[in-house]
Image (cartoon, rainbow, N blue to C red):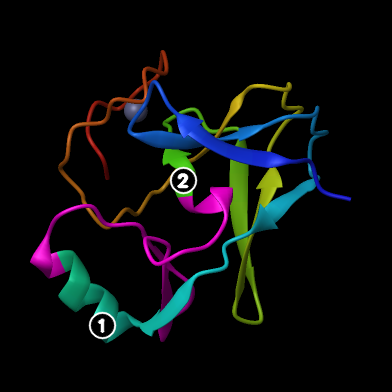
Amino acid sequence: MTSKLVARKSDINGRGCFVTAPLPARKKIGELLSERITNREAERRVAKGGKVRICGLDNRWSIDASRGGDATAYINHSCAPNCFSRTTRGHLLFFALRDIAPGEEITLDYTPSQHPGRPCTCGAPNCRGVMK
Ligand SMILES: [Zn+2]
């Protein structure tokens, strides 16, 4: 069973992904289901600029989460994340890094991100200030 995820306004950036029920550490949060594209296409879209929600899967494939998907597409970056991702056989899965309380925003350390050098607004005490 997975906790319910909702996308709503985030203090970090735009919309974020929030849980409605407590989530114990190591528990699966969900899977990023969206358009699968080649890394070459991902580079092309990143180069075009604008809002980019692309996650690298492996040395061949990426997922562009701006093309549909559920609330996991809105997981924001934090320098003090509460979730981590794993890639298994072409699937990008998110797991709780620690116990997460209802109403908490799910965050992931994007490093390495598709937009290094951009200012980071995560607000964590240990925030690096810029995206890596
Ligand atoms: Zn930060």
Q: Which residues are magenta?
A: 47-73
Q: Which residue is mark 2?
A: 74
Question: In what element is the residue under mark 2?
Answer: helix
Mark with earlier residue (2, 1): 1
Query: Which quadrant of the structure image shows residue 87?
Result: bottom right
Relative side of 47 to 78, left or right: left
Query: Which quadrant of the structure image shows residue 130?
Result: top left
Q: Which residue: 26% across, 40% down?
A: 131
The C terminus, quarter of image:
top left
Relative side of 30 to 118, left or right: right
Q: Which residue is mark 1?
A: 41
The residue under label 2 is which amino acid type? Tyr
What number is the disc on residue 96?
none
Relative side of 44 to 72, left or right: left
Asked if residue 62 is positioned above or below residue 111 in the image, the reply reads below
Q: Is mark 2 within 8 Å of ligand 1?
A: no
Q: Along the line of sight, which residue is nearer the eye, 122 or 75?
A: 75
| Number of numbered discs | 2
Asked if residue 48 is among those painted magenta in the image, a careful observer would answer yes
Density class for disc 1 (Cα within 10 Å; few <14, some 14-19, many ≥20) is: some
